[in-house]
Each structure stands twice: as C-alpha cells, then as structure tokens.
Amino acid sequence: MFQPSYFKQTDIKQMLAFVREYPMASIVTMSSNGLVGNHIPMLVIERDGQYFLQGHVARFNSIWQDVDESVAALALFHGPNAYVSPSWYPSKKDDPKTVPTWNYVAVHVTGKIKFFDDKIWLKKHLENLSDTHERRVNESWQLSDAPVDYIDKMLKAIVGVEISINDIKGNTKMSQNRNSVDQQGVVKGLKNLGLHEAAILIGK
C-alpha cells in the first residue's frame, strides 16, 4: 500500500476498529493458477495477545483446496469513498491550480491463512458471526433458533478461514491536505449528494 504521510494510519486499534465497522473483505490468495480473489465478511478475533481474521467459505469454493500457504494472504477492507470536485474548494476562486481527487478509507491486512473443517470450530465461528451482526442491526436471532439438523447440514457445506494479522496498514484520505475552508466545501458538496458517511470523516 502506498502511504503518503498526510493519509497514513498508524494506530493499530483504530485500524482494527475500522475492520470491525466494515467487515466485508476482499481476500487475495495465491493458487496454482495465480492470484485468486474472494469476498468474505470477517471477524476480528484476539487470542493469546495475537489478532486474527475469521470467516468461512462454501465447501465448493476452491480457495481452501488450491492455495499456496507459503504466500501470505491479503485482506482488503474498504470504507466510505467519494469523488471530490475541485469546484467544491472555495480557494479555487483565488488559485485555479487544482484537480479532482478521490477520498477513501482502506485497511490492508496480510498474514498466514489457514482453513478449518472442524464442526466445533465452525459452530463457534457462526455463533460469533451471527451474534456480532445481530447486535449491529438491533435484532436477537441466534444460531440455536434454527433446527439442530439444519445447522448440522449447513456446517457440512462450509469451511472456516483464519488469517493471522501479521501486518496491518491503513490510509484515511479525507481531504487532510486541504485547508479547513476547503474541507468544509468538500463536506457541503458530499452532503448535497447524500454521501453523509464520507462527509462525516472530513477533518477527522
């Protein structure tokens, strides 16, 4: 990841919080046919002082059967992003030397990937996953709400994925390189387009 000093994230806890907030990851692994991409919601798990990402894939997904585990996996997490027009900068009236850009937030995680076919591991993972996201939507569905035989059938159809967080990098590019007046111009422009999530991050 290219990390200009204006935008580079250095706080690991903040980056992990971002991953928890935007858990849908693009996972890139090396297979016998080259690079492979998969899209998997991941949980951040702490174990013995080490952080891991955990998710699962369909058993028919070849990622767990055709992967070069000697090559680190890459997990890409994306947050709010938006096109930024130079017209939104009040300073443009005095200095027209400006161009469009794109604001975004992203975190990259690299680490060793492992796969799990154990029913106990998978069931615990699904409980953690559903409990976490049920809280996010203010609901209370639990794995135990579904029939046992149905869950057993579903467990046989998936394989667990775990990536150790050996390295984590992040960029928050939200107009930090503009003055406060221009930043407020970007906020106004984004809000006018209904992009409130991106607007909230300006100046933070």
Image (tube, rainbow, N blue to C red):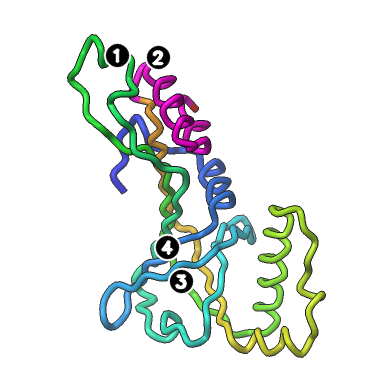
Of badges 1 and 4, nearer the viewer stands 1
Q: CA distance from mark 2 to mark 1?
A: 8 Å
CB of mark 2 within 8 Å of CB of mark 1? Answer: yes
Q: Looking at the picture, which amino acid does disc 1 mark?
A: Ser
Residue 81 horizontal side relative to residue 85, left or right: right
Of badges 3 and 4, nearer the viewer stands 4
Q: CA distance from mark 2 to mark 4?
A: 35 Å
Q: Give the residue number, with chain letter if any, for mark 1.
A: 91
Of badges 2 and 4, nearer the viewer stands 2
Q: Earlier in the sequence, mark 3 or mark 1?
A: 1
User: Range of the magenta residues?
Assistant: 177-203
Q: Earlier in the sequence, mark 3 or mark 4?
A: 4
Q: Give the residue number, with chain letter if any, for mark 4.
A: 26
Q: Position of residue 27 (x, y in %)?
A: 42, 66
Q: Residue at x 32, y 40 (%)?
A: 3
Q: Residue furthest top?
A: 94
Residue 91 in the magenta stretch? The answer is no
* Neighbourhood count class around disc 2 (C-alpha, 10 Å): few under 14, some 14–19, many 20 upward: few
Q: Looking at the picture, which amino acid does disc 4 mark?
A: Ser
Q: Residue at x 40, y 14 (%)?
A: 181
Residue 84 horizontal side relative to residue 158, left or right: left
Q: Position of residue 28 (x, y in %)?
A: 37, 67
Residue 88, above or below 46: above
Q: Earlier in the sequence, mark 1 or mark 4?
A: 4
Q: What is the secondary structure assignment of the residue under circle 2?
A: helix
Q: Earlier in the sequence, mark 2 or mark 1?
A: 1
CB of mark 2 within 8 Å of CB of mark 4? Answer: no
Q: Earlier in the sequence, mark 2 or mark 3?
A: 3
Q: CA distance from mark 3 to mark 1?
A: 48 Å
Of badges 3 and 1, nearer the viewer stands 1
Q: Position of residue 69 (x, y in %)?
A: 39, 76
Q: Residue at x 67, y 72 (%)?
A: 126
